[in-house]
Amino acid sequence: MQGRLTIAEDMPLRLHRQVRLRWDKARGLWLLLAPEKILVPDETCVAVLQELDGGPLSGAIDRLAEKYAAPRDVIAGDVIEVLQDLANRGYLLSEEAIPNG
């Protein structure tokens, strides 16, 4: 996995290629699955991850602010906090840092 990312709104982000967000029907909850790791994300984390589309993070922030009718600056702070935690754990990649091929 790559080195530490500092999350910013202009970053195109996605989950690391070995990480999957999956709905566990039997348990009725979302799981973030990585090799030899399972994380049970909270509702905020799931909402944020579902908005990641490989484009700049600012687009996901805009969509979440509209969806929850919340001030954009509040949503941006929450989103960056959630994603920075995941990046620190190695769950995220920036599309800018991914080599071609």
Image (cartoon, grey):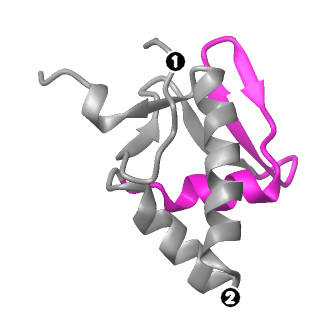
- Residue farthest to the right? 27
Secondary element under disc 1, as helix, strand or loop, is loop
Q: Position of residue 78 (x, y in %)?
A: 71, 56
Q: Is residue 31 magenta?
A: yes
The disc at residue 69 is 2
Q: Is residue 44 left or right of residue 21?
A: right
- Local crowd size for mark 2, using a 10 Å CA cut-off: few (<14), some (14–19), many (≥20): few
Name the side, left or right, on which 8 lies relative to 55.
right
> Residue type at mark 2?
Ala
Residue lying at 58% horizontally and 85% vertically, measured from the top left: 66
The boundaries of the magenta stretch are 25-53
Residue 76 at x, y percent in the picture: 61, 62
Q: For this rendering, which residue is in front, 71 or 49?
A: 71
Marks 2 and 1 sit apart, C-alpha to C-alpha, by 32 Å
- Compared to residue 99, the image places residue 59 above or below, namely below
**Amino acid at circle 1:** Arg
- Name the disc covering residue 4, or none: 1
Residue 97, compared with residue 41, is above or below; it is above
Contact (CB < 8 A) between labels 2 and 1? no
- Which disc, if any, is residue 75? none
Question: Residue at position x 51%, y 76% from top?
Answer: 63
Q: Look at 66% across and 62% down and name the residue there.
A: 47
Q: Position of residue 86 (x, y in %)?
A: 64, 32
Residue 38, relative to residue 20: is it above or below? above
Name the secondary structure under disc 2: loop
For this rendering, which residue is in front, 79 or 39? Answer: 79
- How many numbered circles does the render carry? 2
x and y percentages locating residue 5 in the rendered image:
49, 26
Considering only vertical position in the picture, is 37 above or below 5? above
